[in-house]
Image: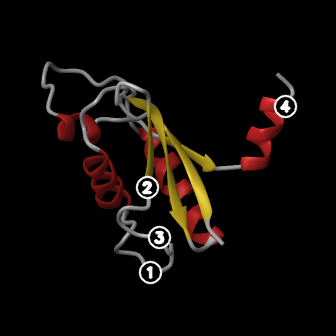
Amino acid sequence: MWTQVYITGLPRSIDPSDEDIEAMLDERYGLSNDDNVMWAGEGTTLIKRDAEGCCRGFAFLSFYSSDGAAAIIDRINANASSEHAGLGGDNNDGKNILQQLCLKAELSDPKLSKEKKKNK
């Protein structure tokens, strides 16, 4: 069984690629370097995109352990509280933009999403 972490604050653009976003998350939060978090690995991150291929601003990371998912949520949110939300600068390089993001994370609750849709 997988535990998914919902991440918000990604750029709403075509660039960077899914691979670049996943690599940045891995580098920034130590997903593959920490055996305790039990990240599902490369290629398992789901970056949500619209029909034109633009990132919708959120993604899902998958973990084999709910404790590991909780640890990553803590890491991401601890960074979010100390970073600025503005991207700043004129540099349009996707990798540089990723380094400047203010991301937030929480456990994904698919049941909650279904309830929201049902109540609309």
The mark nearer the N terminus, 2 or 1, is 1
The mark nearer the N terminus, 3 or 4, is 3
Vertical order, 49 against 28 (above or below) = above
The mark nearer the N terminus, 2 or 4, is 2
Vertical order, 112 against 29 (above or below) = above
Q: Dots 2 and 1: beta carbons under 8 Å?
A: no
Q: Which label lies toward us, 4 or 1?
A: 4
Where is mark 1, residue-wise?
35
Where is mark 2, residue-wise?
45
Q: Callout 3, which amino acid?
A: Ala
Separation of disc 2 and disc 1 at Cα?
17 Å
Image quadrant holding the C terminus, namely: top right
Separation of disc 2 and disc 3 at Cα?
8 Å
Callout 4: few (<14), some (14-19), or many (20+) C-alpha neighbours within 10 Å?
Answer: few
Secondary element at tag 4: helix
The mark nearer the N terminus, 2 or 3, is 3
